[in-house]
Image (cartoon, grey):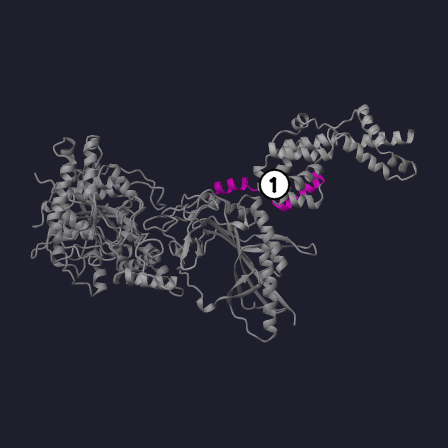
Amino acid sequence: MTLHTQTIHELRAQLRRSKVSAREVTQALLDRIAALDRKLKAYIWLNRDDALAQAEAIDRTGAAKDGKPLAGVPIAIKDLINVEGQPCTCASKILQGYVAPYDAFVIRQLREAGAVLLGRTNMDEFAMGSSTENSSWGVTRNPWDLERIPGGSSGGSAAAVAADEAIAAIGTDTGGSIRQPAALCGCVGLKPTYGRVSRYGLVAFASSLDQIGPFTKDVEDCAILLGVLAGHDVKDSTSVAQAVPDYTRALGKSVKGLRVGIPKEYFIAGTDREVAAAVRGAIQKLQSLGAEIVELSLPHTEYAVAVYYLIATAEASANLARFDGVRYGLRVAGDDPIEMYRRTRGAGFGPEVKRRIILGTYALSAGYYDAYYLKAQKARTLIRRDFEKAFEKCDVIVTPTSPTAAFKAGEKMDDPLQMYLSDVFTLSVNLAGICGISIPCGFTTRPKLPIGLQIMGKPFGEEMILRVAHAYEQATEWHLQRPNL
Amino acid sequence: MQYEAIIGLETHVQVKTASKMFCGCATDFGAPPNTQVCPVCLGYPGSLPVMNEEAVRKTILAGLMLGCDIARLCKWDRKNYFYPDMPKNYQISQYDMPLCRGGGVDIKLKDSREVRIGLTRIHLEEDVAKNSHFETTSGVDFNRAGLPLMEVVSEPEIKSPDEAFAYLTALKEILVSGGVSDCDMEKGQLRCDCNVSVRPVGQKEFGAKIEIKNMNTISGVRRALAYEIPRQIVALEKGEKISQETRRWDDAPGVTSVMRTKEYAHDYRYFPEPDLMPVVVSDAMLAQIRELLPELPEAKRQRFMQQYGLPEYDAGVLVTDAALAAYYEQAVRWSKNPKSISNWVTTELLGKLAEAKLTIAECPIAPPQLAELVTLIDGGQISGKIGKDVFAEMFTTGKSPSAIVKDKSLAQVSDTAAIEAFVDEAIAKNPKSVMDFKAGNQAAINFLKGQVMKLSKGKVNPQMAGEILLRKLRGS
């Protein structure tokens, strides 16, 4: 039995019946990482000794038998979420040397559920990017083709799950940073409704858009892990006090009679031919399972990229101001504070982060605020209303997750706009604050690369998108395919 | 040419709360540097602010006391600028939707005319840290970072340094009386920026605005303005042009000097704080706060004068501090002599408290005990002089005055036979004074009376002693 290829629900059954120990599982993952990660570079920091100690504690206390939902399950964490005593660099030189003094809310939830924290995964610096190439610690490779990128910004988490270097992983999604890499690596990734998961302890990129969510090997695992992450937290004023349902109860239900919305703005020239065909095939599959297909329009879709890059960068320009060398992380000395800031931030931030800080600072400046930030906020409201109207006519909306499969490393690094456009199908979900999931729905032929199907749901409609995703997954075998590593 | 000054004040007041504005850290003054800090007020990555509702309630209370319109919906904004005392390099403040607008502070001018200085707005924000500069390094103490700070912005309606002084004094009195802030300037709980310009009388447009930053005493504001206004007038008379700038006040030489000119004006790039929800002030919340609305100091002063027959001075001293006024009113409830209680509170009690560095809340003498002391004196059980000793004893031991009088046998001697014995002794020991009196020197009787008091260790009833002495001298 290979332990590293197991899902959460498979492992859980075995751990409960003491067929394997948590230590064996963690050791199996550490062995897998040792064997593979040199070429994949999914991890940037490994919690080797402590992970084994956590696993041994699980075995000792019999937490698996107590029914803790993740007892003994090794999970990888994106390097943007604070875990007490561990580094948290956000893949940036500016946080070199910073050791987190506290646990994020989701980390407390994971510890409580018995998860083993394996290590920290690579990402685009401060989650700014779509390929994980904007990391200060090297480029993560796509497990399906090592010449290609895993998507981003949570590329390390996606690659780790797709390559069986973690049973599941945690990522963050500001404009598609969970769903796009999940699509490109062939795993399941869910961005919860804004406010469903506490952001406390997540290093902010764009506060009004960021959400933490799961990467898993199948939809059932996604439901289990989301149930652990979700919940109200008084330390995050934007977290919503709404009871967390048992998401696994949404699984196994038929899609018969459900209305699946197909927005015409998401089926456009520019989408890769094979991607478009795979998504059309998935829609037909849902129809054959009894779902009703509803053609609809989200008329303000074309503004999403512009709106996103104004709001996200404006918020980021303030959020990243705290990295100044005064209290933690990198400090490059200067003759006065201004000189110290300039040198520290000049040396600490990479080019994409600087580009976005400049863009956001500009958008908020006196004389430009109304034309850029304020107008973007108004357009954001229109995009949100598009979805409100659409969901009067349908239960879920189905689209491609990304216009293309994984591209080659370096291909888009000289063209930020092309890079930004790879998130064109995922951004609106964040702007509208709704939920979305990406699941495998096929492969390109040459080379063989995964294709993702995005299912969007109403605010707090996670049960519905999980239900549809699960029904589709159970009727197909895409999720069972593994890269040849 | 005649000139007039136009002054507007921006006053920062620390709101009195147990925890900081956006985290649970304590607000105690004087703790060792960086001991009242957490990831939130240090601006650590991933931390998030949570609004302190008590600070919002107290700011609304201040607004109600000052007659402001209270916003039913307001929001938080980020004010962006880099400085080492700013943990996040942005300050959470309120930009275009403050908690309170309008209202005013009533002040009394020298000629006894009363005028109202209008308020533009009151908003709430977080305080910054405190920088210290050493020989070769600098340090930042983040204990102060994140304390709730209320900014009270006046209209440019103040016309003189004295008016500015009166405005700040009245504002402080109101905020202290409502429990909104202690306004302890030594602890930096009240700080003020002054905007001042001058213009020829009759001119409609304002002159160029000079801002004097970070004044931390009310009298300092008066002195700075008293320097700055003539400086600007002299400059204008010399034909110089005054341009907008920020100045600092140096108290020792008593001058203002340039800090920065307008070219260095900040673009704060305000935008709505995405980490906090807008604040909705409900009818219920407003009604609840209205219940806490205390009597304003001026109204209380008037009432004290009428109800207790106190002179204006006494009433004024008593109402400066709501706790002191409350103490007084409790004591009066046990006494028939409000004026005497006022004398004891405003002189002896305040003196002792200041000496022992205690607040009225920490006063070891309970109000009914003070009333009892006054009753003992008024009833002749002890003399006023002994009363002071008893008071001192009460202050150190916390015992009741009757217990002290009993324990130390301090009761006034009113027994005629006992007093006669002391009088006889005094007459016998001072034949020269007796001769003087008989020779017509009336003042000699005071010396003899003093001797009687001395022999009795102050315990005899002085009035009775005087009468008996007179009777004996005349009779013998």
Q: Over which residues does the magenta segment extend?
A: B282-309
In magenta segment, residue B289: yes
Q: Main secondary structure of the magenta part?
A: helix
Q: Is disc 1 placed on a helix, strand or loop?
A: helix
| Count of labels in the image | 1
- Residue A264 appears in the picture as rendered: yes
Give the image location of residue B128, x and y in percent.
44, 53
Q: Quadrant of residue B465?
A: top right
Give the residue displayed 48% in from the left and 68% down from the top: B261
Mark 1 — residue? B353
> Which of B213 and B357 lies nearest the eye of the viewer?
B357
In magenta segment, residue A460: no
Task: Sort mark 1 into few (<14), some (14-19) or many (20+) by Cα contacts within 10 Å.
Answer: some
Give the image location of residue B469, x and y in percent.
85, 31
The residue marked by circle 1 belongs to what chain? B
> Which of A287 and A57 lies nearest the eye of the viewer?
A57
> Which of B336 and B412 lies nearest the eye of the viewer?
B412
- Residue A453 appears in the picture as rendered: no
Q: Quadrant of the N terminus of chain A?
A: top left
Position of A151 relative to A65 (above/below): below
Q: Would residue A293 be found to the left or right of residue B426 on screen?
A: left
Report the amino acid beneath label 1: Leu
Q: Would residue B382 be found to the left or right of residue A123 on screen?
A: right
Give the image location of residue B340, x and y in percent.
71, 37
Give the residue displayed 56% in from the left and 67% down from the top: B206
Give the image location of residue B270, x and y in percent.
41, 58
Q: Would residue B4 be found to the left or right of residue A374 on screen?
A: right
